Amino acid sequence: MNSTSLQTFGLSLFIVLSFIVIGIGFMFGIDNPVPWIMIAVLAALPYIHRKITARQYLSWDDKLSVGIQLIDEDHKKLIALINTLQTAVMYPSGETYERQALKEVVDYTLYHFKREEDMMRENNYPDYEAHKKTHEEMINKVNEYMKAYDKNSEGAICDLTGYLKIWLIKHIAGTDQQYCAHLHEKGVH
């Protein structure tokens, strides 16, 4: 059983036990505070769940912008694709959907890397090779996760999704910001 299944089971068990506590609590009188507290907790559960779940997803922040429209749009699309993959992980809907979401993330990442590298190369970005190497390292790491996914899909997909989220934000906020000034000087916006 993966962590998502355990969380779902735990939440379901909590809800069932809450209804039992409410029922037993009301047997001791309508003025008993315990069932009312449990009702309040159950009423707040969707809000709490939404807050906890929202932390699992990435969101675009203008601080991530590199000031180049095509690249920013690529980054936004990558965030959306990773969020789709996160949904596939959190709400299991079958391996086919999960594999499709994963394929879309990988394919678009490769497309984006090529676009970004072409732009840097065409504009003689001095750290092109180092930047390209970070892309290659990321792809190699993703390929390792993909091999692990083929052996143990449940464990590997969670690890891969976590890696993608952390790597993408760090890369956009760090490495990608380094080429901005150079490309802007060359008239790329």
Image (cartoon, rainbow, N blue to C red):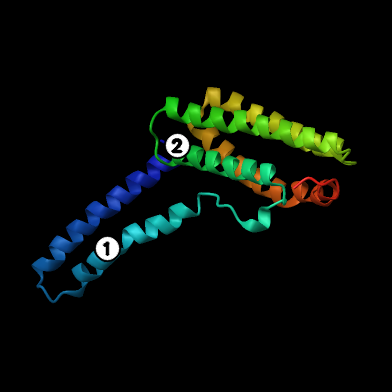
Q: Position of residue 53 (x, y in %)?
A: 44, 52
Which residue shows up at 44% across the image and 29% down it?
Answer: 97
Which residue shows up at 19% across the image and 67% down it?
Answer: 35
Numbered mark located on residue 15 in the image: none
Nearer to us in this view, 59 or 19: 59
Comes first in the chain, label 2 or label 1? 1
Q: Position of residue 14 (x, y in %)?
A: 29, 54
Mark 1 surroundings: few (<14), some (14-19) or many (≥20) residues within 10 A = few
Which residue shows up at 61% across the image and 56% down it?
Answer: 61
Left or right: 122 with respect to 50? Answer: right
Residue type pointed to by label 2: Ala
Indicate whether 65 appears above or below 167: below
Secondary structure, mark 1, is helix
The residue indicated by pointer 1 is 43
- Residue furthest out toward the front: 187
Residue type pointed to by label 1: Ala
Q: How far apart are marks 2 and 1 (CA)?
A: 26 Å
The residue indicated by pointer 2 is 88
Nearer to us in this view, 155 or 138: 138
Left or right: 88 with respect to 124? Answer: left
Nearer to us in this view, 144 or 1: 144
Q: Where is residue 117 in the image (x, y as percent from the top left)?
A: 78, 34
